[in-house]
Image (tube, coloured by chain):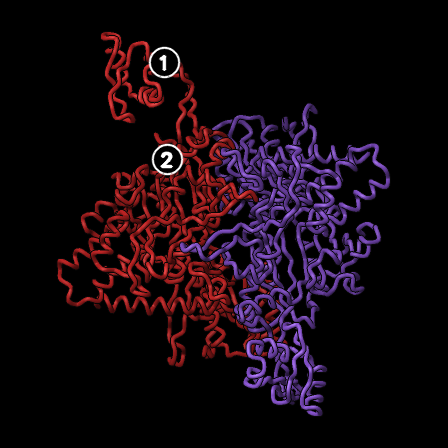
Chain colours: A red, B purple
Amino acid sequence: MDAAQEAHNREAFRQAVVNTLERRLFYIPSFKIYRGVAGLYDFGPPGCAVKSNVLAFWRQHFVLEENMLEVDCPCVTPEVVLKASGHVDKFTDLMVKDEKTGTCYRADHLLKDFCKEKLERDPNITAEKAAEFRHVMAVLDDLSAEELGAKIKEYGITAPDTKNPLSPPYPFNLMFQTSIGPSGLSPGYMRPETAQGIFVNFKDLYYYNGNKLPFAAAQIGQAFRNEISPRQGLLRVREFTLAEIEHFVDPEDKSHPKFSEVSNLEFLMFPREDQVSGQSARRIRLGEAVAEGVVNNETLGYFIGRVYLFLTHLGIDRERLRFRQHLANEMAHYAADCWDAEIECSYGWIECVGIADRSAYDLRAHTDKSGVALVAAEKFSEPIEVEKLVIAPVKKELGLAFKGNQKMVVEALEAMGEKEAMEMKATLESKGEVQFQVCTLGKDVTIKQNMVSIIKEKKKEHQRVFTPSVIEPSFGIGRIIYCLYEHSFYTRPSRGGDEQLNVFGFPPLVAPIKCTVFPLVQNQQYEEVAKRIAKSLTAAGITYKIDITGTSIGKRYARTDELGVPLAITVDSTTSVTLRDRDSKQQIRINIEEVASVVKEVTDGLSTWADMQWKYPAHSSASNED
Amino acid sequence: MDAAQEAHNREAFRQAVVNTLERRLFYIPSFKIYRGVAGLYDFGPPGCAVKSNVLAFWRQHFVLEENMLEVDCPCVTPEVVLKASGHVDKFTDLMVKDEKTGTCYRADHLLKDFCKEKLERDPNITAEKAAEFRHVMAVLDDLSAEELGAKIKEYGITAPDTKNPLSPPYPFNLMFQTSIGPSGLSPGYMRPETAQGIFVNFKDLYYYNGNKLPFAAAQIGQAFRNEISPRQGLLRVREFTLAEIEHFVDPEDKSHPKFSEVSNLEFLMFPREDQVSGQSARRIRLGEAVAEGVVNNETLGYFIGRVYLFLTHLGIDRERLRFRQHLANEMAHYAADCWDAEIECSYGWIECVGIADRSAYDLRAHTDKSGVALVAAEKFSEPIEVEKLVIAPVKKELGLAFKGNQKMVVEALEAMGEKEAMEMKATLESKGEVQFQVCTLGKDVTIKQNMVSIIKEKKKEHQRVFTPSVIEPSFGIGRIIYCLYEHSFYTRPSRGGDEQLNVFGFPPLVAPIKCTVFPLVQNQQYEEVAKRIAKSLTAAGITYKIDITGTSIGKRYARTDELGVPLAITVDSTTSVTLRDRDSKQQIRINIEEVASVVKEVTDGLSTWADMQWKYPAHSSASNED
């Protein structure tokens, strides 16, 4: 199958999934009656239920199992916080404008589309040109505004809708800006991630945890990105639900007590080296990856394992899930290591969870900006005697000598390492002065003996104070759910074979409704039984849908398969009912009094359908499925 | 006790509650390390757990029990939607500015504070003046900008912080404004309520419900109000969680099939008439209130009853809960009836849930603005023959006669009622022409016989098409939680009697943590038992906190009482443990294997503490509580 055919098939599959999702209100373009807004979607009833099931499981799997500290912070965030985090200055995408209409596009998207189009559609392309386009696509994220602009010019790329010329690329900040309070003087933004709310609370949370490391805080909430031109449906949206964990750990000890619980897991990993050398992702045992240093540390490895368990439990296909390590150029300069859980869907491999060791960056940034020390302390069992270098610039003398440059000189002196300082001390003692390079001034200055005191003090220290490292698993809930839709979707022929029926094969954990209740035919007796069963389902906390329309039972099954309902109860007598399994379409007979508890056992995951088939008689009517 | 003393006591009680809440991180002023932002709060770990328990119960009590359609819509909302709903034009508060510093204040708050201060602190106040101040406070919400300004001037009210003169009051829109997309041309707002997301989806939701009424949609989510000067802590904030229900119903039939389930409830109600005539709230049976027309209809009454059950289940004191009907001047002109669930706390009676019959207003507003008919249809079992008035303006003739005014004339003709139209028809037939007033032109025009055809047609109609009424219960989750904190809080003397200990007496349903586990003394054996129990609690889905510090058991109980943890397990042997009830401080002995299931039974509400005391032996050690 060639690339074009493959692309076509992917497109057709996606259309089938998306049509079903929209028709059954899993999601709805927001504000549809007003022709919608790009990048904003509503979750309709089944989508909302799936989302709330996924979040409940996330809470169980991460927050409760690991005793994390969950917090809930506002979306509206004052500028100072996002200035400290770097978002105000750097959270940008490069944008080009149609020079006549003013329509905006993401510069990298246009360039990528152009290369992809050429590669897929141009039969006369030379091997050399093809290699070039592939290279451009590979390095896309690293291109500067100038480089992107140059390529767009070189390839003669124009505005897709009008063919008008494009402006050079320039950065556009992706945060939604607003103003807090009535004065108009306090700029604020809608948070682009939930993490900052945790970092700024580090001190209180550390105290709440008894001043002990490690601990993790977690938050589920809305985040906002004012995308330039959203596309890819639910995958690139302007408002979305994030679930984030910030695990704070001593940078000198990133072991994890529960690592052994996940070390034997084996799954697709895609280390940096394999990517660079052109290999594919391969199955690696997690314990090995950590032991060999492919994954930087145990805690990072532990979370990779837990994320793997989380996603596969939800129903993500393990063959279409891989953990890809960031390349050196993808990673922020401060990050120690970073792995993305990528899920393959019709759009390709999609980053759904990022698991990064962000070192001390975030806490340091907020310490610097706020002046509040976000640090932890390790108490020594016995005080330790340490020799400490103390550099004390004499500001008065330095001021006289360097005037306006005094501050730069002071900072440079204080920043000296131990070796450099001790050499200076020796030189000052022998020669009385020394030449000293001040980088921020771009020149050497002369330091005299009376300008600085350098000594080594012996001190007893009772504790080690340090900025914790943070390991951050960050989950894009909407993306995970969309991939889950694709992985769960299949079609099968109707009984007559004249049409294809859609099925969402959700595991019970995820299914928006656990069970449907149908009277086989419209009659008052059956309806009453159905209502009695409905009541017992509510009491057992099972979500259900009751359908007392006169539609054929086959049509009713088809409707409920499309919603991914795992079990269906058909009332065909006043004493017992049939229970049908969605995927096998097999049925068993159960007494009315028992049916709710059987449904509960299966949907709670305590028993399987096979267990129940063994326990209850099969029902083999001609069951008119269509 | 006089008013001043009472105010002082309330203040002291509130301080005790708030101090405990802040110290134990139930909530934290957001962005505290940057000196915070007024009106923004974080929920710390216990607060976050309480919130998620309250929301889970809300979902169970409303969405699941009533089979509501839950949706999840974005916060970012385009202007057109909020223009239609009236928020862009009318969602304002009146503001005054300090004329020198520019600091902003809510005009009504300053006036209210002034009157309150006078009433509480001025011993020389005349009876006449006192009556005047009380009157001003009563009509505060009805005062126009001019009237408010006049009062502020008359009383010589100045800026509270500086005593500078104030500007006249002017309206300030309370929505956070932003811009959607990169062009800067699409204004948007952060939604001030979640309801609009449901209204704009009415058509799809009605279809999803099988084109049947009544049905309800529900949404839980963040809402935003850019308050001018937030105060009252958690009660008036700039971002908060709303849980809203929109119940769509045929305006000609507002009965409710389950009303009988709540009709015998009896609780404090405060009908409009009683307020006007100066009476107090009184206990009324809900069935009576509906039968006597005090509550407008059964569906509204049903929701009042369900809200009562919801709040009291959470632990709201039924003596400090009342349902107050809106006065005629409080209610929007379109509303049929409106009741607030008000909860009394140290700030007075606080509106926590609004339950309004909004008639057809919202759906009509969006129908008009979007051009999409948000209507329902009742199919007749047999077609009904109706006589229908058909007014058909002849546009060509009208165009020739009225040129640019044609459109206004056509609209005026089409808008005629039956009586007016039939009179015109008669006049046209007898005289050939008629004088016709066109309001939009501000004058009469002459209509001739060839310009309009007016006939009565007999038609068979198969259905009645109408705009549904909407009954909206809207829950301020943060306010409910704050009142719950106050209602649950009490203090009791420590064993030595030397200090007062704080307790949050949450019901298990609400408690942030259900159970704590303590080894009585620090030793490895007990610690291992504690960890084994912890594991069985996790497996049973029970949130717990384990405390293996060497602190005295009494201190540890006190700590956990402050978090409102209902049960505590103390490990004092390797075979059995003691289980302690928070409120009675009584203890029973239970085998290690059984303890998790006992905790689960009590915290799930399946058994009470009394049941367990009957089943298990009491433990009566000197139990060193302090």
Q: Nearer the viewer, residue B428 or B369?
A: B428
Q: Where is residue A417 in the image (x, y as percent from the top left)?
A: 29, 21
Q: What is the quadrant of residue B512 in the picture?
A: top right
* Mark sitting on residue A59: none
Chain assignment, label 1: A
Which numbered circle lies on residue A394?
Answer: 1
Question: Can the viewer see residue A597 in this picture?
Answer: no
Residues beneath discs 1 and 2 located on the same chain? yes
Does residue A138 appear left or right of residue A344 in this picture?
left
Q: Is residue B477 above or below residue B393?
A: above
Expressed as whole percent of the image width and height from the top left, the position of residue B60 reads 59, 56
Q: Mark 2 lies on which chain?
A: A
The residue at the point 32 percent across, 55 percent down is A96
Residue B391: x, y in percent? 63, 84
In the figure, is residue A261 to the left or right of B146? left
Total numbered circles:
2
Distance (Cα) linking label 1 and label 2: 31 Å
Q: Decide which of tag 1 and tag 2 comes sooner along the chain.
A: 2
The vertical placement of B526 against A341, above or below, is above
Mark 2 nearby-residue class (10 Å; few <14, some 14–19, many ≥20) = some
| Element marked by disc 2 | helix
Q: Nearer the viewer, residue A118 or A312?
A: A118
Q: Mark 2 points at which residue?
A: A361
- The crowding category of the residue bearing disc 1, from other C-alpha atoms within 10 Å (few below 14, some 14 to 19, many at least 20), is some
Amino acid type, residue under disc 2 in the picture: Tyr
